[in-house]
Amino acid sequence: MTFEYIDIEDPVFRANCQERNEEDYVLVRCNDYASVPINIPNWTPKPVCLSRRFERVAQTIKQMEVRPDDVWIVTYPKSGTTWAQELIWLVCNEFDFQKAQDIPLDARFPFIELSGLRDLPETINPLQDALQMPSPRFIKSHLPPAFLPNALWSVQPKMVYVRRNPKSVAVSYYHHSVSLHCYNGTLDQFIRSMMNELVYYSPFHQHLIEYSELRYPNMLSLCYEDMKRDLPGTIERVCRFYNKPFTGEQVTRLADHLSFDRMRQNASVNRSEWVEFNLKQTNRADKLHDNNMRFIRQGQTDGWRKELSEELIEAMDRWTLERVPPSSKYARLFQ
């Protein structure tokens, strides 16, 4: 059995999952991981919190064809994925800003397991879109290594992984879950669920550690905070990774295109139609103009300081210290 689906037994979760709209949450264990080139002694992947709907796509993703010229991006959710997708697509498509504006990012860069998280309109099937795309394909996923296609590890197309500070991820992920996953709990409840590894794609720390230990020569690792500090430098790194020529003028124009204000106003990337569809489907149309319901919300590196209580900040710091002691070689991943 490639995948096992394990009911969540945590009593706090079970007592409140219905009112928080988490009834479909389940732990998924992948038993087919021998081909993953990971440098962790006696590694056995931990179960991952996903949706029961994941059964719809799990085996197809695991067995999907991988092409040498595929372009993959993998992240834990809310780590700068959309930002990096737009950057990568434009670099790999000769800085074609007009085409990027004309075609929505979701069509250019399908999110392959999306229908394994929530119900979609019948006309939308990102996994099938990816399977049928002409080369070069651009593919997005949040899955940990064991859940990705087995063929990825032998074909080895280029892949980008992006990480972000856990507190920034947590706050952004809460607002994302409210708007797009119809989460009904409070910020405090969501953060505590994340620390209990009971939000989609958790365990969080394990996700970053596993990707940091992949022996995968065609992977570029980026950091959200570094991108914020030096976006032009990041653009140049991506250009060199994909062996794409660039000029200073192109880098400057792309950095301006990727600025937060422009990304928020860019209909091709801000997924406003998804947010609007979801809010209307769940009788929350009054929230359409709520800033916290936007897909691209604030984009700050330390916005969490305004939203997290001192108690939650201390709890999250303890959580990371328990998972990754300061002396660990992985501590740098969570700064």
Image: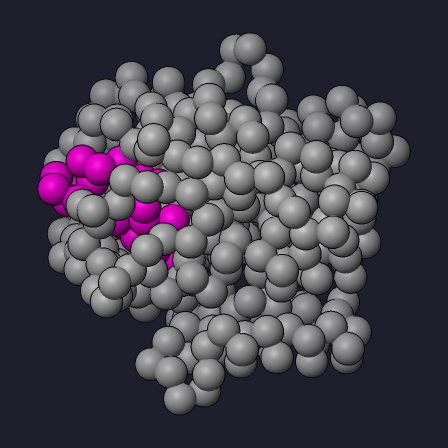
* Residue 156: quadrant of the picture: top left
Q: Is residue 310 left or right of residue 85?
A: right
Q: Which residues are magenta?
A: 144-162
- Identify which residue is drawn at 60% across, 22% down: 119
Q: Is residue 96 left or right of residue 205?
A: left
Q: Nearer the viewer, residue 287 or 30?
A: 30
Question: Quick check: can you spot residue 247?
Answer: no
Extreme residue toward the top, this view: 122
Q: Residue at x 40, y 89 (%)?
A: 327
Task: Identify the residue shown where x is 52% and y is 69%.
Answer: 165
Location of residue 286 by image quarter: top right
Taking the image as shown, residue 165 lies to the left or right of residue 296, namely left
- Asked if residue 148 is among those painted magenta in the image, a careful observer would answer yes
Q: Position of residue 138 (x, y in %)?
A: 31, 35
Q: Residue 274 is drawn in which quadrant? A: top right
Residue 292, compared with residue 268, is above or below; it is below
